[in-house]
Amino acid sequence: MTATWSRLPRSTPFRLALTFAFLFMLAFVLSGAIVYRMMSADLAGRLDETIRETYSVVAATYTESDLEDLIATVESHSQLSSKKEQLFSLTDAAGNRLAGNFTAAGGPDGFSMLDAKMPGVPAGAQYRAYSGSIGGNNLTIAFSLSETEELETIILMSFGWATLIIAGLAVAGGALLASRVQRRLDGIAATMVDVSHGRLDTRIPLTGNGDDIDVVSNQVNAALDRLSALVEGMKQVSADIAHDLKTPLNRLQMILEGAADKAAQDQDVSGDLADARAEGHQINETFDALLRIAQIEAGARKARFTDVDLGEILQTIAEIYTEVAEDDCKSLSSQRLDGTTDRIHGDRELLMQMFANLVENALRHCPPGTAIKLSAERRDEHILARVADNGPGIPAYEREKVFQRLYRLDHSRSTPGSGLGLSLVRAIAELHGASITLEDCRPGLAVMVSFPLASG
């Protein structure tokens, strides 16, 4: 935790949080300044309206050639404002004071700010005044700005404290959120370090809220799953290669040693050489198949993808292997879709090899009398290709294992084969974005490959 906080000022999430906090505060200050200006203008307008209304009320007491009521009204209002929050002045044309609590003479008509040098105006105070002429006399009414200024001060103080509080919360909240993000990033970094040290079972912890980091973490975990599976597969392949090739290599060595002994005794070694050639050919075929699977899994053949007719491929495979099946006392038939709706995007040569492997696998492991059927049907936006037989099938616990490289149901390796046929089938299916499943036909086995339809 301490290390996380010590690195926080240098972390990208914290810097982003500070940037957004600064932008938020800048927007808050600008909007607050605008609101303050609007409120100040509104208060000034309301004060002017109050002064004007008071002036109208006082001026309404004057009647032609009757100044007494006006004087009395001005005096009564002056006495009510003992603290001089409001100032009233009535002077004659010569500037002599007739009534009021201060003397305003020579001022302009309308609104103005009072000069503190006027008689009766408190020092240091500011007043908003309105003056007008009534019956040759001058009436001036002024209101102190102290209440308005006090209200504006309260607003400014409130805004200032709000700014400080919001700034503190923004920085603290940003730091908290940044620390949480940093901990998650640290978790990703720690996982990568573990993986680099060979701990391939380590995974990035997820929060489960589905945010961007969780999405990226899921993708990284999926990549790690794939990497772990590939590494485990390579380990298994290495072990299987060592196990599967040890026997033919030992056999090859024994054949060559026997041939050398016969040659030393001037005996015929042509049979031994033929056996050695067959063993070498089988070893080469195993390595070629492994190399081909690796190339397919790397996606090197995708550049040759075109729209192909899956039904036509199945029909071609059936025509090629029908006589082979009959010679082996088995039957082979095919059923395809009508029309041109069974086109997929793929490599025709690889697809031919995939279905050929499936048919050869059925022919090799099924007894005489077995019926093998190839078919294709459309299901929604996919084409389902099916290679089914009524042979002995594969036990349920073995169905996933048979796709492993060099894995064979005949653990004694007494029957011909390298155990790479179905591994090549899966590699080709995955290259085409297809899913492959094995299903029990009771009796027999069905290999189903679901291809996405070609777009457009």
Image (cartoon, grey):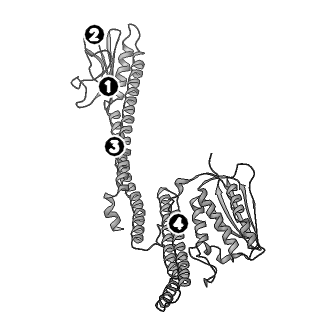
Q: At which x and y percent is residue 2?
A: 33, 67
Callout 2 touching callout 3 (CB < 8 Å): no
In the shown orientation, is residue 82 left or right of residue 364? left
Can you identify the residue that label 3 sits on?
A: 157
Q: Which residue is identified by label 4?
A: 292
Q: Is residue 44 above or below residue 293?
A: above
Q: Nearer the viewer, mark 1 or mark 3?
A: 3
Tag 1: Cα neighbours inside 10 Å, few (<14), some, or many (≥20)?
many
Q: What separation in Å lies between label 4 and label 3 (alpha carbons)?
A: 78 Å
Identity of the residue drawn at 40% across and 29% down? 42
Secondary element under disc 4, as helix, strand or loop, is helix
Earlier-in-chain disc, 2 versus 1 = 2
Task: Tell me which corner region of the image, top left, top right, bottom left or bottom right, holds residue 330.
Answer: bottom right
Q: Which residue is mark 2?
A: 93
The secondary structure type at the circle numbered 3 is helix
Relative to 93, is 225 on the left or the right?
right
SS for callout 1 = strand
Q: Which residue is mark 1?
A: 128
Q: Between tags 4 and 3, which lies in front?
A: 4
Q: Secondary structure at mark 2?
A: loop
Category of crowding for the residue at label 4, using alpha-carbon neighbours closer than 10 angstroms: few (below 14), some (14–19), many (at least 20):
some
User: Alpha-carbon distance for marks 1 and 4?
Assistant: 96 Å
Hey, what amino acid is under mark 1? Arg
Amino acid type of the residue that numbered disc 2 sits on in the rendered structure: Ala
Give the spatial CA distance, label 4 vs label 2.
Answer: 116 Å
- Where residue 134 sits: x, y (%)? 36, 11
* Quadrant of the snapshot with the N terminus: bottom left
Q: Is residue 247 visible?
A: no
The circle on residue 448 is: none
